[in-house]
Amino acid sequence: MQLAFPDANQIAWAQLPISQDDIETVREECQQIWLRDTLNLFVVKSPAGIDGYAVVDDVKGKDQLITYLVIVSSNLVVKSVEIISYRESFGGEIRNHQWREQFDGKTPDDKLLMPGEIRNITGATISARAITAGVRKILCTLHIIRERLPR
């Protein structure tokens, strides 16, 4: 997070409720499903105010969970996507910086479709689709609950 926000001097943790209405809205607008009723959020602050947010989430790969981090600016533009823990035997190419950087600059308005805006990786199709869907879910959710984000 320090690389994404070099002026940050504080990172706070917040847990925001995700209502059933929020879950339904995410399902309808983004075709994604939340399995939790909370969003665990890191709030990145600098002397100027809130610089952005970071969300850690899990998506299911072929057989195992993939833990990833989405870092966004305060106006919900992706700064970085990081793979925290990759547990699958195959498909680890999604950890490659060149693949992950294609999310940089994306917003809730982007469709994040694969293939299309996001390139596939031969041999890692399931993992690439899972991370792409996960990033879309995070962006969509942050947009839906935007008014409740810490300011």
Image (tube, rainbow, N blue to C red):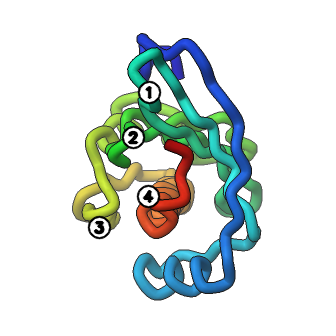
The CA distance from mark 1 to mark 3 is 29 Å
Circle 3: is it few (<14), some (14-19), or many (20+) Cα within 10 Å? some
Q: Amino acid at mark 4?
A: Leu
Q: Amino acid at mark 2?
A: Ser
Picture coordinates of residue 111 (x, y %)? Answer: 29, 67
The CA distance from mark 3 to mark 4 is 10 Å
The CA distance from mark 4 to mark 2 is 12 Å
Asked if labels 3 and 1 touch by Cβ distance under 8 angstroms, the answer is no
x 74%, y 54%: residue: 65
Between disc 1 and disc 3, the foreground one is 1
Asked if labels 4 and 1 touch by Cβ distance under 8 angstroms, the answer is no
x 49%, y 16%: residue: 8
Between disc 1 and disc 4, the foreground one is 1
The CA distance from mark 2 to mark 3 is 20 Å
Picture coordinates of residue 132 (x, y %)? Answer: 45, 58
Task: Residue under label 2, please give it.
Answer: 74
x 53%, y 34%: residue: 82
Between disc 1 and disc 2, the foreground one is 1
Q: Amino acid at mark 3?
A: Lys
Q: Which element carries disc 3, helix, strand or loop?
A: loop
Task: Residue under label 1, please give it.
Answer: 49
Asked if labels 4 and 3 touch by Cβ distance under 8 angstroms, the answer is no
Whichever of callouts 2 and 3 sits on the residue coming sooner in the sequence is: 2
Residue 111 image label? 3
Task: Residue under label 4, please give it.
Answer: 139
Position of 14 with respect to 134 (left or right) is right
Work out whether residue 78 or residue 6 is closer to the camera in this orientation and state it: 6
